Amino acid sequence: MELQLLPLLLACSLFFPVMTPVAREIADPCASQTNDFQHLNSTGLHLTLHHPQSPCSPVPLPSDLPFSTVIAHDAARIARLTTNTPSGRPTSLHPDKNSGNLADSLAASVPLAPGTSIGAGNYITRLGLGTPATLYAMVVDTGSSLTWLQCSPCVVSCHRQTGPLYNPRASSTYASVPCSATQCGELQAATLNPSACSTSDVCIYQASYGDGSFSVGYLSKDTVSFGSSSFPGFYYGCGQDNEGLFGRSAGLIGLARNKLSLLYQLAPSLGSSFSYCLPTSASAGYLSIGSSNPGQYSYTPLVSSSLDDSLYFIGIAGMSVGGSPLAVSSSDYSSLPTIIDSGTVITRLPTAVYDALSKALATAMSGAPRAPAYSILDTCFEGQVSKLHVPAVDMVFAGGATLKLAPGNVLIDVDDSTTCLAFAATDSTAIIGNTQQQTFSVVYDVAQSRIGFAAGGCS
């Protein structure tokens, strides 16, 4: 098996600071999180899911990461979730005269269309790849379709990652994908970028993200595994040029509604559903693929949108603070399309709804000292959320599914002395972010076209 060298030469290169993990000791609180693969039952997989800043994560972000950085990458992610126009920044693939392998060179220049931003809000799990299998720490993203990871020999560039790079030559089941394969043609829908083709007929993918991060490499297939369960013939990107803010993860697991996503590729074996509980930084959660208990959830239907049919859209029907409905009309809730997303931190609401929520919360918390606005967060209080009396906030979705938010789902600590309402206003697309989803069990029942919620998911 021979891995062809990928002659990638970018027209403009970007420098991104490498996020280094927090120095930590192996402590008892993390002992229960070391088993990343647990069978939920005979038909599904149960994987441990880590908060991006959990000290128990295999690739934790710095605990002192400024919250302004989180907000900046959140904004980039949202901008690219809500648009599918090209970014205008080209990636150029030209012959490498120094490679000694001009037969496998090509010259192509295409605009990279932006996908979602990886940023600092995505959760982490482990995935096994190859035969024999090696484990890799991967970002989990419901807003992306193509799964990819860094591959040796890293012809152009690889960011620093925890653990070894995936080595295609070390796997007896690895194969590159030819340009004539159906999956090569499906890259346009999966990445919003057209595929390219080397002169040796190897399909090349290009995945780009809203914060300027990107991965370019070979479309490949190999056996993907989770503990003792393995699935041959899994299509993914074998990255040879990977640059941006990915922390020290090896790559990304795509769970969007697309033929190349992990969900769709495993569906013949496990079914078309997955669920998760997004944990806080002080706990562990899970990602389950292909199995759930339908009776434990209250459901809201998935709705269609012309914005992007790979994303998960639902409808907000109402909100209340302290048991009192917000003073807005029902049409205000449905005035914008609404995405539920695992990687966005701050929920965006239609402006009229947000204004009413901010006013109602400020009134209910009138005894708490106010703090200045923090970036886009304009409803802030002195102190930490754990020390404040926060009113009950409910989010009701079409069909009656309800998130009864705990204080930590309503406010978010932005520094040691300030906490803010974890919502912001938007006039484009509403997004249900991960702060509001934390500790709930959320099921994406794609087969039945519905999303379900249940409290106490991480316990």
Image: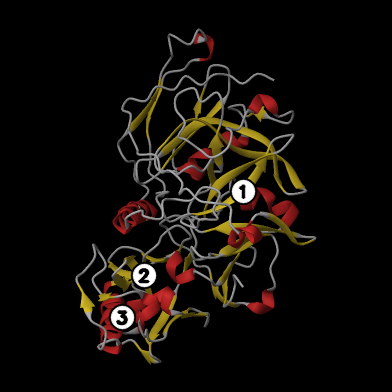
* Quadrant in the rendering for residue 380: bottom left
Q: What SS does tag 2 mark?
A: strand
Separation of residues labelled 1 and 2 (CA atoms): 27 Å
Q: Earlier in the sequence, mark 1 or mark 2?
A: 1
Q: Earlier in the sequence, mark 3 or mark 1?
A: 1
For discs 3 and 1, the disc positioned in front in the rendered view: 1
Separation of residues labelled 3 and 2 (CA atoms): 15 Å
* Quadrant in the rendering for residue 222: top right
Q: Which residue is mark 1?
A: 126
From this view, report whether residue 215 is shown above or below residue 413.
above
Residue 165 spot, x, y in % from top left: 57, 32
Residue density around tag 2, few if under 14, some if 14–19, many if 20 or more, within 10 Å? many
Q: Does residue 194 appear anywhere in the picture? A: no
Q: Residue at x 48, y 60 (%)?
A: 342
User: Which quarter shows the N terminus?
Assistant: top right
Q: Which residue is mark 2?
A: 412
Q: Amino acid at mark 3?
A: Leu
Q: Which of these two is toward me, 26 or 250?
A: 26
Q: Amino acid at mark 1?
A: Arg
Q: Which of these two is toward me, 286 or 76?
A: 286
Residue density around tag 1, few if under 14, some if 14–19, many if 20 or more, within 10 Å? many
Q: Earlier in the sequence, mark 3 or mark 2?
A: 3
Q: Which residue is mark 3?
A: 357
Q: Which of these two is toward me, 290 or 423?
A: 423
For discs 3 and 2, the disc positioned in front in the rendered view: 2
Residue 259 spot, x, y in % from top left: 60, 47
From this viewpoint, which residue is outermost toward the left?
A: 372
Q: What SS does tag 1 mark?
A: strand
From this view, report whether residue 194 is shown above or below residue 458.
above
